[in-house]
Amino acid sequence: MPIDAAKAMAAEPRTVSLSWDHKDVLLYHLGIGAGIPATDPAELRYTLESGLHVLPSFATVAGGGMALAAGLSTPGVDVDLARVLHGGHTITLHRPLPVRADGVTQTSRVAAVYDKGKAAVVVLRTDVDDVDGPLWRGEARIYVRGEGGFGGERGESARLDVPDRTPDLTVERAVREDQALLYRLSGDWNPLHADPEFAARAGFHRPILHGLCTYGMTLKAVVDTVLEGRVERVRSYGTRFAGVVYPGETLRVRMWRETPGPGRVQVSVTVVERDDAEVLADTVVEHV
């Protein structure tokens, strides 16, 4: 069996060193569509090194995005990349991410393996620290088609209902034709996002956008509108990937503020050109 749940969960955590600098941050920001218009002061904070702010979703690619690669090479996990989809992702920030870092440690382990019948879901948990202490925790849910049916726990399946009222804010964000080609330079080299033949083998009529690119574009939309561009206000951000996005399409991002209590924004993301087909669901940004 390609996935041995017991072996995967019993495997020793893997610790690797990460480092990054302003060039990695700038490349990531460009990969999620920052810099349009190029001279807009609101965009320059993502694209100009002299006053660079780090969007928290950079955590998903910091150091070359090694967390997912580590998860797919864990003992007990041996899968075909053509069967793999990113099912969901959550990051919890302990403090704002630095523009430059060296000697950062990332510790990853398989926290759970769920049996969804026709698929397996591998939950990969990562904790990242620098010399000053914890930076963030990430949790990726990796969906592997055709690997279920091994008799394991099914896991939670609760869904977050979309609020029954008009969104407080709605914005649209265009996905460039070359978006996936640029985004993959931050470390996700899965050919699903660039190679038409590989995409066809995976069941898609052309390469699809990385789910984490949509994830980053969405957080940027929330930060730029609800949080007035202040990246340091984000405390956590989680989503479930509900559908695919193709380069060249347009994202419609709907946002609902929730009060009273701690700051919380619920988000729904759909594709304009496909009758608002859902692509991100169960999406929440918690903030101060």
Image (tube, helix red, strand yellow):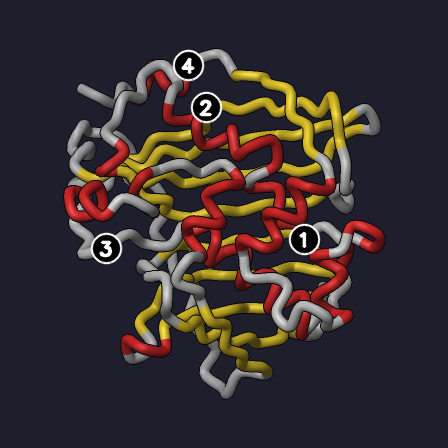
CA gap, disc 4 to disc 2? 15 Å
| Residue 145 appearing in the image | yes
The circle on residue 70 is 2
CA gap, disc 1 to disc 3? 29 Å
- Residue type at mark 4 is Ala
Which residue bears the numbered disc 4? 10
* SS state under label 3: loop
Q: Are marks 3 and 4 in contact (CB under 8 Å)?
A: no
Quarter of the C terminus within the rendering? bottom right
- Residue type at mark 1 is Leu
Which residue bears the numbered disc 1? 55
The circle on residue 276 is none
Say few, some or many: other residues with alpha carbon within 10 Å of mark 3 (under 14 / 14 to 19 / 20 or more). Answer: some
On the rendered structure, is 189 left or right of 83? right
Say few, some or many: other residues with alpha carbon within 10 Å of mark 2 (under 14 / 14 to 19 / 20 or more). Answer: many
Q: Residue at x 23, y 55 (%)?
A: 206
Total numbered labels placed on residues in the image: 4
CA gap, disc 1 to disc 2? 23 Å
The furthest residue to the bottom: 166
Q: Is residue 117 above or below residue 243?
A: above
* Camera-nearest label, 1 or 3: 3
Label located before the other in sequence (1 or 3): 1
On the rendered structure, is 48 left or right of 148? right
The circle on residue 206 is 3
- Residue type at mark 3 is Arg
On the rendered structure, is 213 left or right of 226? left
Label located before the other in sequence (3 or 4): 4
